[in-house]
Image: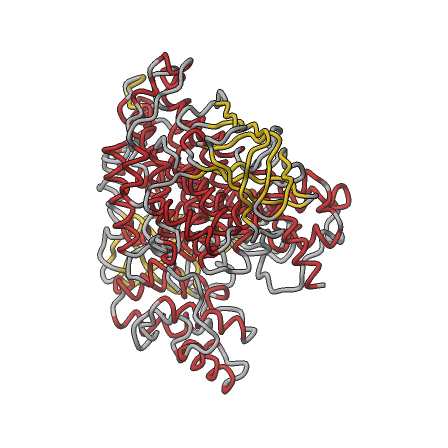
Amino acid sequence: MDFTLGEEHLALQDSARNFLSKEVKLEPYLRPETNEKPVERDGLWPAIQAMGWPGLVVPEAYGGLGMTLLDLTMIVTELGRSLAPSAFFGNIAGTWAVERCGTEEQKQALLSQVAAGELTLALAVADPNGDVNGLSAGARATGSGDQWKLNGKKSFVVEAGSADKIVVVADVDGQQGFFVVDAKAPGVKLERLDWRDITREVNAVTLTDVAAERLPQSDADSWAWIRDRLYLVLAAESVGGAEQSMTDTVAYANERIAFGRPIGAYQSIKHNLAELAGGIELAGAGVQYAAWALDENRPDARKAAAIAQSYASEQYCAMTFRSIQVFGAIGFTWEMRNHLYYKRARTNAELLGSPRDQREQLICLLEAEHQAAA
Amino acid sequence: MDFNLPAEDDPRRVEVRRWFEENPNPSYKQIAEKGYAVPHWPAPWGLSADPETQLIIEEEIERAGIIHPTTINPIAVNQCGQSLLTYGTDELRQRFLPPGLACEEKWTMLFSEPSGGSDLGALRTQARRDGDDYIINGSKIWNSLAHKAQVGVILVRTDPAAPKHHGLSMFIFEMSTPGVEVRPILDMTGHEPEYNEVFLTDVRVPASQLLGAEGQGWRIVLEQLQTERMSMANPGAVWGFGPTAHELVSGLIATGKIKDPLYRDEAASLYAEGELLRLLSARNLSKRINGTPPGLEANLGKMVASPHGQRLSALAKRTEGVAGMVRGNPELPLPEMDYGMFDSWDYSYWFAPAATLGVGTQEVLKNTISERVLGLPRDIDPTAKTPFNEISRPQLKAAS
């Protein structure tokens, strides 16, 4: 057994951190006008594509690097730490949908372009009420073979505006089906939501008789397979963001003087931050384990993913709340970046279902284990 | 990265298992002589085993149905034995280690005092040099196992003129020495006493029984607490021991109480945190395997583990309702297993307030973490640099 990160992981993390510290510019997001008008995307996503990150976990057979999820979390933690506003999350969601549900030809065609940085994908799974678990798909597919039409409305689609193609989860005679549509196809209407986390673009997508290609290899487990990986990505982002928020907060607490001492000398500040340091450490261990368990296809991988996401997102929320408290009123202003982290934390905790939903998944798995043992 | 534990057919495991098969029901003396009590120590006490082998041996001891020597005689096998190994003379080691590791002589740790536990450096018990001996006078409190112990490891002030942390020294001595009086403390659980007060009146200890040099006591204590905290980052109800969230969930499922939506979410939350605590322990172990000292992260684990255990036993107790208020009543069922000292939800629950007091209070632990892990400013101790015997009430008053 070896629970520590290897040299190659640390090197990957370092290079991602260096790259993002140069490329990510949050200043434009802190200008007052961004409250009304979204920030135009800069060259970050193309730069990320040029780094080859979209192809990181794409299998080598489809032109990717075939790296592990653990490798991926090294980079995603840094994306979270820097709040990198990019299509990374949306694209990887679409990529996994194709990998899990596509035919060999579809994977050759789509994944190789993703890996080459020539194609950006997104995944539309939630219905307009935010349900991601397939109780209502929000969209219906009709047709057969290679002739499919989609109708309906999806929402909470991350980075659909940057995508060339969108993978859409739609109802096919009561079953969950996965379809690819051209983001610019006739009948596709994107509406940008006034999403609280302005470092992400989140859209509603209305589909009216949109021509679609089916990804026919999907089954009852497809969404859970994709979801567990997305849990991991969100959790890794949350750990990176929480670590950065802690770093900023400790720096401020060491600098800001009140009653003749740095405020970080007072136990009411110190003790809160110590507790959060414990939570963030645990969250990091959970992400590391979930990545390994998913990589190794362990029987407890599903539990590990649910644990990682529920715990990390709550720690991130708690840390970013505390950060604003330690900064005091200045931390409540638009011009400080505290709120960007605070909003990313909350939205990460809701995007794919709440921490309570993940705990429900966990407890259902435990009940099933007990039943099987009895 | 590999979270797999050493396999069943690992040659190191096979060898250890064979020994336990060839020596069924071994005495603790046999276990110690084989080197299995402290496998990570050098010969002749241990096997200079790497942490992975150490883990295998621990697992195989458990598998053989034997309570680990660390549980039987923790101060000798874990915290203070290590200090004797590092700082003791060869003569002292020969005298105290063999019976200690064989669990034939129980050890107790005499650190805290009635005047202060968190501010341990302010302790008042004194040892005065007298020829080839020291004469100890004072009193200690919260000494687990002292009523059963033959050996004491004591922290005393040898230089009252030095600042508080600099004037301390550590001795090992026989509890049968004249002038030692042990009185058990009935704690709030009402269970058989675990802790004691120890009074020392003109206790004469040979100077040769000093660990390390005079004035080195504080440094040795810090090293010991580090070891102890590391072992407490497991997810049991009290200090890492006792039932975990696994058993809580089992009990709630067995009784159908898991269907209650509030218990359900809370139990899931505890289960998640418990798993993460296990991972943290594994990571610390792994760091040791790779030769990196676990350092201050062990403190993080203990800080989370103590309130985790408190919430765990509190949820168990709450699900029992009014029936759980009667001592000895049947309670939330626990799967049959050896839980050690904390073998019921009831005892774990009533013991819980101590979990954030023992081995350094939660508040002191948070100070340590915020100062040494996060790099926040140190708390002010107005007495830290004053010679201990010049610390006066007026000075304390002026500082407050």
Q: Is residue B371 left or right of residue B176?
A: left
- On the image, the x and y values in percent for residue B97 come to 36, 71
User: In the image, residue A370 lies at what x, y percent?
Assistant: 68, 58
Q: Vertical placement of A225 versus A254: above or below?
A: below
What residue appears at the point 65 percent right and 58 percent down from the top-left corner? A369
Q: Residue shown at 59%/41% (left/top)?
A: A148
Q: Residue at x 27, y 41 (%)?
A: A50
Q: Is residue A130 positioned above or below A359 on the image?
A: above
A84, B341: nearer the viewer: A84
Quadrant, the N terminus of chain B: bottom left
Residue B235: percent from left, percent from top: 52, 52
Residue A295 visible in the displayed image: yes
Q: Is residue B115 visible?
A: no
Quadrant of the drawing holding the C terminus of chain B: top left
The number of discs equals: 0
The image shows residue B141 at horizontal and vertical percentages of 46, 48
Q: Residue furthest bottom?
A: B22
Above or below: residue A80 compared with residue A297: above
Left or right of B334? Residue B233 is: left
Residue B166, picture quadrant: top left
In front of the other: B247 or B188:
B247
- Answer with the quarter of the image where residue B176 lies: bottom left
Q: Is residue B4 above or below residue A122?
A: below
Instruction: Name the colour scheme.
Output: secondary structure
Kindly give the residue lying farthest to the right in the view shown. B323
Residue B237 is left or right of residue A326, and the answer is: right
